[in-house]
Image (cartoon, rainbow, N blue to C red):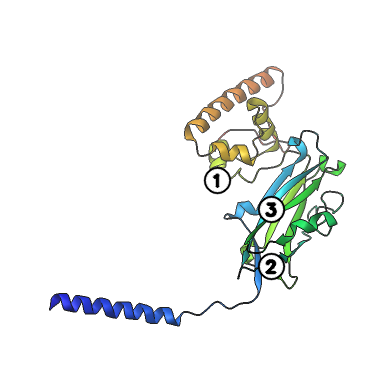
Amino acid sequence: MKKFITYFSGVLMLMGLASCEEKLPVYDDPQAYLNFNYSQAKDSVANYSFVFSKGKTQDTVWVNLITQGFVANHNRSFELQQIVTGNNDAVAGKHYVAMTDERMKPYLEVKAGQTQVRVPVIVLKDASLDNSVYNLRLEVKNNGEFAQGFQNRRYKLVTITNLLSKPAAWAGAMDWYFGQWGRVKHQFFIDVTGENWDDAYINSIINNYSMVTYIISRLKKALSEENQRRVAAGQSLLQEADGTIVTIGI
């Protein structure tokens, strides 16, 4: 009897689940949406500096997008537009190649059966980048085929400069181990280690505790020696442009 009751209860449970499934709404939104594809808020920003370009006058920053909605059996075009921030906005033709440029057309398309696409942002070297960081905020423009997707994935900000700029990966654990970013500190790290300390390098070391510990020890030793030299020469300790003393770690 006990086995029968258990079996009967199981059947009722399955019937209940089936009933619940039947009540689930069917997705039938014909509108396709497009989101910038990143998992963390910090990845909404891509910082580019010609400092590391080895003399290039133009370079490429790749941004990834992912569709939301039904997959299509035909190619689908989309549009990206610059949104003015009011804060050193990049100028098309001067700091980057406009998204309406003929060269961009082949990339502004999601191929049939595909759900993801990579778009090149072609950045241009200009003398104005020597003294400032320029901002290029890109968003999807509703063109009938695609509309903007999730609010928290609706834009990508590309910063363009010929100065050292803060890598997006310099956050969280980087702040804990090495302290907050500063342009003088960044250059000092480059001079000591010979590495760029860009996103690629930071991501390659930050989860390797032994490597991080070794690099911190090396940097602290070099900073101590640099400050001793500076004091002996009657100079201040190594500091940022605003007077903040360069330190390593929190």
Distance between the Cα atoms at labels 3 and 1? 23 Å
What residue is rendered at 67% in x and 36% in y?
Answer: 244
Quarter of the picture holding the C terminus: top right
Q: 143 or 131, which lies in front?
A: 143
Identify residue type, mark 2: His
Q: Nearer the viewer, mark 3 or mark 1?
A: 3
Secondary structure of the residue carrying tag 2 is: loop
Q: Is residue 95 visible?
A: yes
Q: 155 or 116, which lies in front?
A: 116
Secondary structure of the residue carrying tag 3 is: strand
Q: How many marks?
A: 3
Q: Which residue is mark 2?
A: 74
**Residue 200's disc number:** none
Q: Residues within 10 Å of mark 1 (few under 14, many from 20)?
A: few
**Position of 217 relative to 174 (above/below):** above
Whether pointer 3 and pointer 1 mark residues with C-beta atoms closer than 8 Å, the reply is: no
Q: Which residue is mark 1?
A: 172
Image quadrant assignment for residue 169: top right
Q: Residues within 10 Å of mark 2 (few under 14, many from 20)?
A: few
What residue is rendered at 64% in x and 33% in y?
Answer: 246
Quarter of the picture holding the N terminus: bottom left
